Image (cartoon, rainbow, N blue to C red):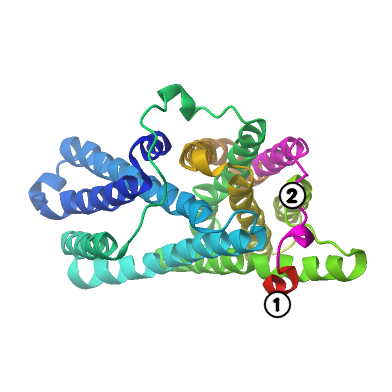
Amino acid sequence: MGGWVGQRLGLKLTLYSGLGLQVIALGMLGVVPTEWLLLPAFSVPFVMSAQALSGIAKDLTKMSSKSAIKLVVPENANSTLFKWVALLTGSKNALKGVGFFLGALLLTSIGFQYAMLVMSAGVLVILFAVILLLRGRFQTPTSKVPFKAVFSKSRAINLLSAARLFLFASRDVWFVVGLPVFLHEALGWDFWQVGGFLALWVIGYGFVQAATPTFMTRRMKRQLTEHGQAYGPDGKTATMLAFVLAVFPAGIALALMTDISPTSALVGGLIAFGVMFAINSAVHSYLILAYTESDKVSLNVGFYYMANAGGRLTGTVLSGILYLFFGLIGCLWASVVFVLAAGFISLLLPTNIQPMSQLPNLEKAIE
């Protein structure tokens, strides 16, 4: 729905709305009387409502930011588009990991409700800064866009969204519930060790995402030297990366089924999985913009992130269920199935994105 609103009323409105809703969601938790939060009948639905509002705020902001990149980067400047979307996505995830540490610091130093108020005030400052500093128009709003346009009619967008759903389900089906519970219960890690390790993982994941265009640029430079033309990421890239990614959860599962140290298998495997998953995600984030026409960018990006959220929901729910009945190994094999599904769907993605050598100043862009 955020993409539809952005298409009808403009991306600035959805960006402002996302930041504003985040201020409200955090403020809700900061101003409610403490004794109310101690009543489960009130606190559970209230906190869930605040977190749901916060999730809506996050996705409105993310959809607006990702769509804006497509509109500010010149047409056919694929290498520039890839660089900026990877930088935005990677920095967002790295800061998410930093946020885990900052949240823990605020919680232990000033308490829960004051922490909420400090964060709400911080987002409010950002909102005012964006309103004052963001100039120009991202796009011309189209008031006649019907609501049914939310559901993409582009085969490439639909296929990429389906692949994205399974890709993110493959991560969250073992990462969100199964992994932290296993680290705590089976390996004896305490709360701070589990939280700190996963936060560092997210930070590293973000850095790899941001650096992905650098890896790809080296490949493009070799292609330019050897064949006279260089191709950017396309459906073949997404397919190959998905099938390679499936090796890592399978390897971790097999290691846990043998006498290999579970700590070594999980830590090493999770780092390797994170690197490959970050590259997969960065390529997907580029492809959604590469496959999208500028006049439909918010609709298509909104649809794509709806699939992303659906995958995360599916993975999170299954992570708890599978861990309960089959343990972490069951979660990992489910991850393998989801990654392979993403790979087989990616086989159908278009592979005819414009060769980079047909773009102006390719050598300069690569350098």
What label sits on residue 316 in the rendered view? none
Element under disc 1: loop
Residue highlighted by disc 2: 250
The region drawn magenta spans 333-360
Q: Quadrant for residue 248, please give it.
A: bottom right
Element under disc 2: helix
Q: Quadrant for residue 358, please give it.
A: bottom right
- Which amino acid lies under the numbered mark 1 shown in the image of this protein? Glu
In this view, the residue farthest toward the bottom is: 367
Q: Residue at x 54, y 59 (%)?
A: 73
Residue highlighted by disc 1: 367
Is residue 149 among what the camera can see?
Answer: yes
In the picture, which quadrant includes the N terminus? Answer: top left
Give the Cα distance between marks 2 and 1: 38 Å
Q: Position of residue 19 (x, y in %)?
A: 28, 53
Q: Position of residue 287 (x, y in %)?
A: 64, 48
